[in-house]
Amino acid sequence: MLLINHSNANFECGTDEAGRGCLAGPVTAAAVILSENFTNTLLNDSKQLSEKKRDILQPIIIEQALTFGIAHVFQDTIDKINILNASILAMHKSVKQLKPQPEFIIVDGNRFKPYGNIPFETIIKGDGKYLSIAAASVLAKTYRDAYMNTIHEEYPMYNWKQNKGYPTKEHRAAIKEFGITKYHRKSFRLLPEQLKLDI
C-alpha cells in the first residue's frame, strides 16, 4: 500500500524522472501534488506497470491531481551538463510549474539539489512507497514515451517506438549501421566499441 504523505506539509509534491539511461532523446521529469483523499489501487512505480496500465493512469492522474508539471531536458543540454544534472534540472522545471508551489518535495532516488527554499527529502525507491512519486513516475514515463513515438516517425530505423531510446541490441545495431542522429546523446557510450563511431 503506497502512502499519501511523507511530511506534515499541506502541499507536498512528489517528483521523478524517466529516460536517464537512454542513448537518445530527453530526460523527462514530472512533479505531482495529490489531495489527501486521493486513492488508486492500480497506481504503483511506473516500472512495475505495463504500458497499458500507465496509459489508463495518465488521464486519471492529470484529472485528479491538485497540480502537476512535466518538463523535458533535451540531449544537447544533457551533453553539456551531464545526465545527473539534467535529471535534477528537469525535476526543478517540473516543480516550477506547480500552482500552488509545494511546501515540501519528496524525490525518487538519492540525488537532488535544493529548489529555492523548499525543504526536500530524497527517498530511494520512493516511487514504490509514495503515491505522489508514483504518479510523477507515470507522467514522466508516458510523456517521454509519447515524445519518442513522435521522433520515431522521423527516424524509424532506430525503432524508438519500441525501445524508447534505451540501449537495446537492436538500437545499438542501428547506430552501428546508420550512425547517430541529432537526438542521440553524444556524451554517452553509444556503442561498446566507441572508437569505431565517427561523431
Image (tube, rainbow, N blue to C red):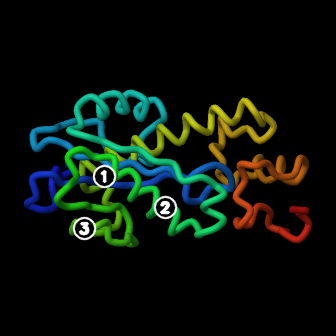
Type of amino acid under label 3: Phe
Count how many numbered circles sit on residues in the image: 3
Cα–Cα gap, marks 3 and 1? 13 Å
User: Residue at image x 64%, y 32%?
Assistant: 150
Which of the numbered marks, if any, corresponds to residue 44? none
Q: Is residue 156 above or below residue 113?
A: above
Q: Which residue is mark 1?
A: 133
Q: Position of residue 10 (x, y in %)?
A: 9, 52
User: Residue at image x 28%, y 46%?
Assistant: 98
SS of the residue under disc 1: helix
Dot 1, crowdedness within 10 Å: few (<14), some or many (≥20)? many
Q: Which residue is mark 2?
A: 87
Earlier along the polypeptide chain: callout 2 or callout 3? Answer: 2
Q: Is residue 164 above or below residue 81?
A: above
Dot 2, crowdedness within 10 Å: few (<14), some or many (≥20)? many
Query: Which image quadrant is residue 154 in?
Result: top right
Which of the numbered marks, if any, corresponds to residue 120? 3
Type of amino acid under label 2: Ser
Q: Position of residue 100 (x, y in %)?
A: 20, 46
Cα–Cα gap, marks 1 and 2? 15 Å
Earlier along the polypeptide chain: callout 1 or callout 2? Answer: 2
Horizontal relation, residue 19 to residue 174: left or right: left
